[in-house]
Amino acid sequence: MQLFSAARHIVFGLTLFCAALAAGVSIAHAKPLNVVATTSMIADAARQVAGDRAEVKALMGPGVDPHSYRQTRSDIAAMARADLVLWHGLYLEAQLEEFFLDLEKRRNVVAVGEAIARDKLLSHAEYKGRFDPHVWMDPKLWETVVYAVRDALINTDPAGEATYRANADAHVAEIKKLISYMTSVTATVPKKSRVLLTAHDAFSYFGRGYDFEVLGIQGISTESEAGLRRVEELVNTIVERKISAVFVESSVPERNVRALIEGAAARGQDVVIGGTLYSDAMGDPGTYEGTYIGMIDHNATLITRALGGQAPAGGFQGKLAAGS
Ligand SMILES: [Zn+2]
């Protein structure tokens, strides 16, 4: 009797298990994938592509500088629990490089920025043998990263392949709309004003994609302090080219940009701060600027308007915060 009862339980349990297997998708929904990403931009791509199949955590929040970021104890714990860890690579997370190269041997870790073909990357004089990592600034390149995120999710969770493909295609379609908006508004900036002067060299891909000359006070990484000589050089450029607006960045201190403005003012050239650009981190979570599309829309709209071009204050979708 007891034996019979136990057997009945096993059969009942197996039936439930098979029913759950047949339902496939609902198993994944019951327990979402646990995904950890380094930058907020990569986390956004993972959220767009995974939808409710994954819970995505970004290690670096708004205003955090990836060049100097070091992992915390809670980051390590989060990565140990993750089904998939996404990092950028291309030496963006300079202080985490060794950590990730080691983690890659033991865990499901993918450097999604490395998916971009080498001939599409820009080199940088300061980084011998390495590339400029700020590829998200050109949405055309970012499409490749979105697809790399998609492929990493498919490898981790093959049952979700159809969802990941459909979501990635939908997100890339949005990115393509953003690109056509950026192309048309940036084209209205007068030729002589197409100089983008910012706190660090994060905008070279934007400059190449949309025809701006890009000058950074600090080099490509935020680690080297801007030398006095560099500030003097740039003050000369501002005065000679009559540059009327320079930009600050959310993840870099403003003081270097202020030094430029004061230097130019002392030589009779008035320069204003054109606004704060999102360079290496997005805006606050839950806001439009806290999404990849919103971040890039904000930058392109603000740059266009500050340098004398025409763009709607609300940006590409009328969603930009007033005065942002
Ligand atoms: Zn940077």
Image (spheres, rainbow, N blue to C red):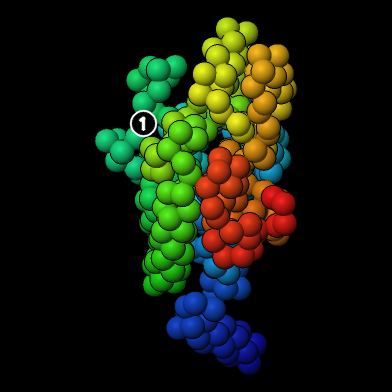
Is 155 left or right of 60, judged from the image as shown? Answer: left
Quarter of the rendering occupied by the N terminus: bottom right
Q: 135 and 47: which one is in front?
A: 135
Above-or-below relation of 165 to 108? below
Q: Percent position (x, y) of residue 234?
A: 56, 17
As drawn, the residue found furthest toward the top would be: 229
Residue 86 can be seen in this image: no
Name the residue at 70% across, 14% down: 266
Mark 1 Cβ and ligand 1 under 8 Å apart: no
Name the residue at 34% across, 42% down: 116
- The residue type indicated by label 1 comes to Leu
Name the residue at 68% across, 22% down: 261
What is the crowding at mark 1: few (fewer than 14 residues within 10 Å), some, or many (at least 20)? some
Name the residue at 43% across, 55% down: 184
Q: Percent position (x, y) of residue 166?
A: 41, 71
As drawn, the residue found furthest toward the left would be: 119
Question: Which residue in the protein does label 1 denote?
Answer: 122
Above-or-below relation of 192 to 48? above
As drawn, the residue found furthest toward the front would be: 268
Residue 53 can be seen in this image: yes
Q: Percent position (x, y) of residue 287?
A: 69, 58
Above-or-below relation of 233 to 16? above
Q: 94 and 237: which one is in front?
A: 237
Is 207 left or right of 61, judged from the image as shown? Answer: left
Q: 66 and 272: which one is in front?
A: 272
Q: Quadrant of residue 44?
A: bottom right
Above-or-below relation of 123 to 304? above
Q: 262 and 81: which one is in front?
A: 262
Is 226 left or right of 287, judged from the image as shown? Answer: left
Which secondary structure lies at badge 1?
loop
- How many numbered badges does the structure rendering display? 1
Q: Percent position (x, y) of residue 196?
A: 52, 33
